Image (tube, rainbow, N blue to C red):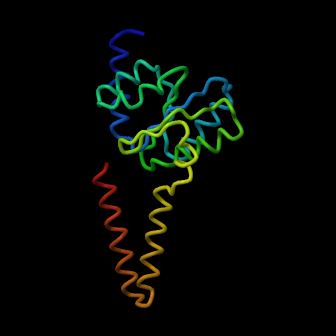
Amino acid sequence: MKRDKKEQIVREVAEKISRTQGLYLTEYQGLNVSKMAELRNEFRKAGIEYKVIKNTLVRKALLELEQGDKLAEGLKSTTAVAFGYDDPIAPAKIIRKFSKTNDALKFKMATIDGVVYGEDKLVMLSEMLGKTENIGRAAGLINNVVSSVPMVVNAVMRNLVSVLDQVAKQKQ
């Protein structure tokens, strides 16, 4: 691969990392083509990008974003990267579910909001509530608190949806 192509890949990976809410490193050695396609389809359904990228190129992209030292130890052997743009917990749920029936997929580490989680934290991450589950719980709490006044509930829910919509637009 030529140097300019490598530099382009590093820039693309750095851009993806800067947009992601959750970055997961996995080892996929031993997965056959059909199993890898099945895993990619699961990620795609959840809006997660899953790429096999050379370790050296990922390391350079991480160093550009000053996160290389945190994840460098996970960049050994074969590495595939899951970029969770909308929900930082969704990749953990998919990795855990898929690895139960496919021993070849191994979780290496993840970073969410600058916090690095090692390979022993997959179960904890996968059991956390995702974005939609948290929104549902918040809506349920608000509904329970103000359920005695239906008009207030409608106004509060409408305002909550408006605020969440504005936050989503700002993040884009």
Residue at 37% from the left image edge and 68% from the top image edge: 161
Q: How many marks?
A: 0
Give the residue at x 54% y 31%: 26
Instruction: Tell me: 8 left or right of 52.
Output: left
Left or right of 65, for residue 134: right
The x, y position of residue 87, in whole percent, is 45, 50
Residue under the point 49% across and 35% down:
109
Residue 28: quarter of image: top right
Quadrant of the image occupied by residue 153: bottom left
Q: Is residue 162 above or below residue 32?
A: below
Position of residue 86 measured from the top left corner of the image (x, y, whole percent): 42, 49
Q: Residue furthest bottom?
A: 148
Q: Check the image and name the residue furthest to the right.
A: 101
Looking at the image, residue 166 lies above or below residue 67: below
Residue at 49%, 49% (x, y): give it.
89
Residue 110 position, x and y percent, is 46, 38
- Quadrant occupied by the N terminus: top left
Q: Is residue 13 above or below residue 47?
A: above
Residue 52 spot, x, y in % from top left: 51, 26
The answer to whether 66 appears left or right of 146 in the picture is left
